[in-house]
Amino acid sequence: DAGITQSPRYKITETGRQVTLMCHQTWSHSYMFWYRQDLGHGLRLIYYSAAADITDKGEVPDGYVVSRSKTENFPLTLESATRSQTSVYFCASSELGWDRNSPLHFGNGTRLTVT
Amino acid sequence: AQSVTQLDSQVPVFEEAPVELRCNYSSSVSVYLFWYVQYPNQGLQLLLKYLSGSTLVKGINGFEAEFNKSQTSFHLRKPSVHISDTAEYFCAVISNFGNEKLTFGTGTRLTIIP
């Protein structure tokens, strides 16, 4: 089935460890996004990508690294996890970015806990 | 710059009662407005959107929203809620000028009481 899948669904890691969250979409959408969801903050944009090999920072990029070597994949890496990065992470894709006629399609999220 | 405010973080409602979830936005230019819904343990999905034309827009699952330019509001309503409407609802805005990003509100958790 076409869609956007995130893995893992749940992850517990220790402070200082590197962790990578995976995101894969089957629509061949040009744009992909990473958001984090925190109580009281709603969704905040971490990074986004307009196409393979093109990425840009969002609102809260510090401590995160992304890559996009293939259109369908957009992994998010926390190079040295901190407790403040405990959150629910959502990957999304869209055909035309934030275009009014191009809704975002979200994955089911990864709940990350940093101890 | 644009912003969106959802005044209520939690809204409890009895089943079959009406509900209104409030959303106000701020922008110096014209905007497009959206409501997304997040069911438990799922990602967000588009509920409805206002682009232009009629200020009353209808979405999925019996929800509707009214764009009020003078009040800078885009409140979401449903005349009779069901248990399955339990979810978190996010209002979002994007200006129709320039290379703006979609801005989400902080969300309203709707809890339906049987």
Image (cartoon, coloured by chain):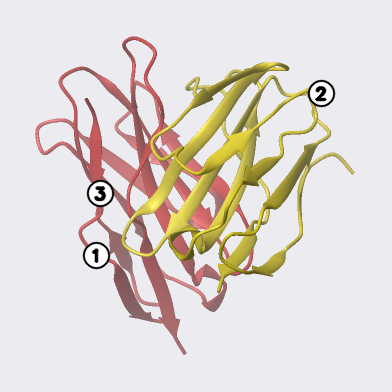
Label 1 vs label 2: CA separation? 40 Å
The numbered mark at residue B23 is 3
Element on which disc 1 rests: loop
Instruction: Tell me if residue B79 can be seen.
Output: no
Q: Which residue is mark 2?
A: A70
Amino acid type, mark 2: Lys
Q: Nearer the viewer, residue B114 or B6?
A: B6
Q: Residue furthest left?
A: B70
Q: Tell me, what hue is chain A?
A: yellow
Element on which disc 3 rests: loop
Label 3 vs label 1: CA separation? 9 Å
Q: Nearer the viewer, residue A82 or B17?
A: A82
Label 3 vs label 2: CA separation? 37 Å
Q: Which residue is mark 1?
A: B8
Chain letter of the residue carrying label 2: A
Residue pictured at 24% horizontal, 19% vertical: B30
